[in-house]
Amino acid sequence: MPIDPTIAYRRTRQFSGSGPTITPAKAKAVATSLRQCAAAAPDIVASVTKLHDVTETVAATPVAVLARPGWAQAAAISAAPLIEEFTNGGRIGNRLVSEEMAGALAFLAPRILGQYDPFALTAIPGQGLPIPGRLLLVAPNVWEFASEWNLDSRDVQLFVCVHEFTHAFQFTAAPWLKDVLIAKVRLVIDAIDDGFEEDALDDLLALMAVLEGHAEYVMNTVPIARIPSRKRITAAVAARRGAGSNLARFANRLLGVDLKLDQYRDGEKFVSTVIRERGHDGLNTLWQNPLYVPDVNELKDPHSWIARVLS
C-alpha cells in the first residue's frame, strides 16, 4: 500500500492524543453504550427513509469503536485508493504523502464523532470486510462533545449512530455510489493539475451536499420520543460545525470533506423539497441510477431535478 497508515496513527497520537482522560470503567461504559445505539439505529433510519429493503444488510454493518489514533489509521487506509496515483511512479514520495495525510488527519481527529466508511473493500483488495462498508465511532470525541455541551450522553450517541447509518443506507441502496464518488474525487484531483478546479469541485460538493442533507433531514425527522434532546443536539452540532478553526477547514478541504454551512442547508432543502413534493418514494429514486444525481444547479433548484427525473 503506497500510504503508510501507521504514520497517521503515530502523528494523531502525538498531536491530538487518544482523547480526554476518563476512567477505564467510564470508557468501557461509553463503548458499550455506543454499540447498543449502533444496533438500534438501522431500524430508526429505515422508519424515516422508507428504505426497508436494505435494512437487514445495513444492520449487518461492522461497527468499530475507536480512539482518535485508531480512526486516523482507518481513514488513511480508506483514503489510499483515492490518491494512489500520486504515490506510484515517483511523482511524490510515499513517505511525504503519508506524512501530509497524517498531519491533516491529526487535526481532524479531535472533531470526528463518527464516520460511515464505504471504502473498506476498496482500500485493501481481497482483504476487506464481507460487506462493502463499516461504521467508525470515535468514543472519546462523542463523550467529550456531550460533556462540553451539557447534552444527554445516550441521546448524543444515538444521534451520531443514526446520522452515520443514514450514509450506510445510501451506499447500500445505491451500490454504484462508491465508484461515482471516487470518480468525482479523481476528477477534482485531475482538475487541480489542469488548472480547472471549480466545476469539478462543485460537482463533487453537490453530491456530498445531497448525502449530508439527507442525513440532516433524517436527524431532524427522528421522533422526539426516540431522541428526546434531539433539538438541543442539532443546535450544538450546528454551532460546533460553524466554530471550526481555519486550519481544521483547510484539513477538511485537503481531504475532500469540506462543506460550508450553506451547502448543508442546500442539501437538506433539496431533500425536504423532493419529499414534500413527491414523498420518500420520489427521493429514493435517486439511489436507482447514477444519472439521477443532481448537479449543482439542480441542488439549488429541486423542482428542476423533479422535472428531469420524476416527470
Image (cartoon, grey):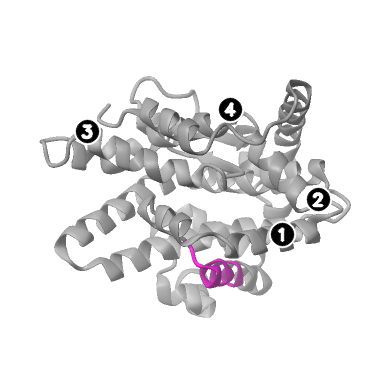
Residue type, numbered disc 2? Leu
Q: Secondary structure at mark 2?
A: loop
Disc 3 to disc 4, C-alpha distance: 30 Å
Q: Amino acid at mark 1?
A: Ala
- Kindly identify which residue carries mark 1: 236
Disc number placed over residue 94 in the picture, else none: 3
Residue 142 on image: x %, y %: 68, 41
Label 4 vs 1, first from the N-terminus: 4
Instruction: Choose the circle earlier in sequence order: 3 or 1.
Output: 3
In percent of the image, x 51 and y 60: which residue is there? 245
Q: Nearer the viewer, residue 202 or 237?
A: 237
Sequence-wise first label, 3 or 2: 3
Rounded to the nearest angstrom, the CA distance separating label 3 from label 2 is 42 Å
Q: Nearer the viewer, residue 113 or 131?
A: 113
Q: Which residues are magenta?
A: 259-270
Q: Which residue is mark 2?
A: 151
Cβ atoms under marks 4 and 1 closer than 8 Å: no
**Element class at badge 4:** loop
The answer to whether 24 is drawn above or below residue 133 in the figure is: above
Q: Position of residue 186 (x, y in %)?
A: 27, 51
Quadrant in the rendering for residue 262: bottom right
Residue marked by disc 4: 62
State yes or no: discs 3 and 4 in contact (Cβ < 8 Å).
no
Marks 4 and 1, how far apart at CA: 28 Å
Residue 275 visible:
yes
Tell whether 304 sits left or right of 216.
left
Q: Position of residue 54 (x, y in %)?
A: 61, 40
